Image (spheres, grey):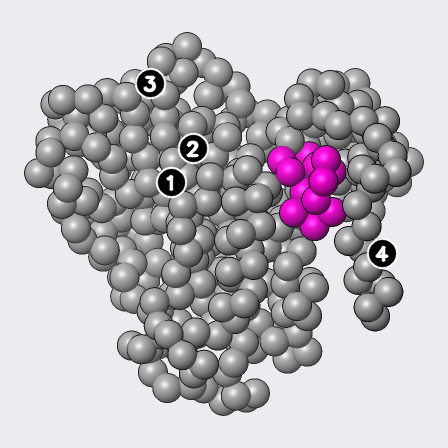
Amino acid sequence: MSLLSDLINLNLSETTEKIIAEYIWIGGSGLDLRSKARTLPGPVTDPAKLPKWNYDGSSTDQAPGDDSEVILYPQAVFKDPFRRGNNILVICDAYTPAGEPIPTNKRYNAAKIFSHPDVAAEEPWYGIEQEYTLLQKNVRWPLGWPVGGFPGPQGPYYCGVGADKALGRDIVDSHYKACLYAGINISGINGEVMPGQWEFQVGPSVGIGAGDQLWVARYILERITEIAGVVLSFDPKPIQGDWNGAGAHTNYSTKSMRNDGGIDVIKKAIEKLGLRHKEHIAAYGEGNERRLTGHHETADINTFSWGVANRGASIRVGRDTEKAGKGYFEDRRPASNMDPYVVTSMIAETTILWKP
């Protein structure tokens, strides 16, 4: 095994200019990440200088077998924390050979919204709090839980310390550093309320970059759990009963909200979000009705609400924002399995472009 480790960690730059580019895309379920690697003649940092590539869409539920070729368009480049050196991770979106975005390409419409002059002028910032659960590989039961049984009730686990409270910290810390290495603006991590559940935050990120960074952060986490022999779950309610679910709270602000008098802009934006509550809920993740029950720090899925420092509301405005009269707000409705391209662009479209 030591020889295998030595080979994995070979420094290619000692013998060749060539690099390895790992092309990453989203599969047919909308949550399954796929990737494959190719050799390039030298270092690349600009996605526009990367070649398009293709894959068999019939094997990812994205194309029929008799016309299975799907084309990958490179969109953003990150440093590869696994191969290191000049090697890169490349987030891509997917198109037909004729250049049409395939139905599961949610990035395409998001990019159109973020490139709209009115949206670009507002410089939308996002901070996404990605919650997730680590599961034991063979039994699909949370990491550190007795098989077929339960740990002690919630209370000591949130931001907890100790072998019986912080379950999987080595995975979490590895992911934190790997994201920083990759160039992702990961801003923090913490243990969550349910044991075996964790959170990382990506942001502040601007526009389409929020989706790109969160997807690559998810990919890196999936790779690390693969190495550790642990299963990663983004299910919004992995354990039924008196256990917290998993969300992806999305913090949001525009230039107008961040400027003096921004609190009035925030209130108008929240009012518009309330008018489109059902549309947003429908796009905020599968199985979210199991999480948004009105309990465990959630608002009921059928009722829109907002409040200052209220974690049981659909939208939370922070005390600092209220005091300063400007700042940001938090949309607490998105599930942990939401598509960040969909959620971020939908919030921008509703609050900036939509005229009720």
Extent of the magenta region? 78-90
Query: Which residue is under mark 3?
Result: 122
Furthest residue toward right: 66
| Residue 256 x, y percent position in the rendering | 23, 20
Query: Which residue is under mark 2?
Result: 205
Against 9, residue 105 (above or below) is above
Furthest residue toward front: 14
Residue at image coords 71%, 30% = 94
The quarter of the rendered structure image containing the C terminus is top left
**Secondary structure found at label 2:** strand
Residue 33 forms part of the magenta stretch: no
Given contact means CB atoms under 8 Å apart, are the residues at marks 1 and 2 in contact?
A: yes
Q: Nearer the viewer, residue 309 or 281?
A: 309
Disc nearer the start of the sequence (1/2) = 1
The residues tagged by marks 1 and 2 sit, at their Cα atoms, a distance apart of: 7 Å
Query: Which residue is under mark 4?
Result: 7
Query: Which residue is under mark 1?
Result: 127
Q: Nearer the viewer, residue 38 or 197?
A: 38
Q: Quadrant of residue 121?
A: top left
Residue at image coords 48%, 16% = 115
Given contact means CB atoms under 8 Å apart, are the residues at marks 1 and 4 in contact?
A: no
Question: Which amino acid type is marked by label 4?
Answer: Leu
Residue 148 visible in the picture? yes
Q: Nearer the viewer, mark 3 or mark 2?
A: 2
Against 295, residue 278 (above or below) is above
Image-based side of 301 in relation to 288, left or right: left
The residues tagged by marks 3 and 2 sit, at their Cα atoms, a distance apart of: 13 Å
- Crowding near the residue tagged with mark 3, few <14, some 14–19, many ≥20 C-alpha atoms within 10 Å: some
Disc nearer the start of the sequence (3/4) = 4
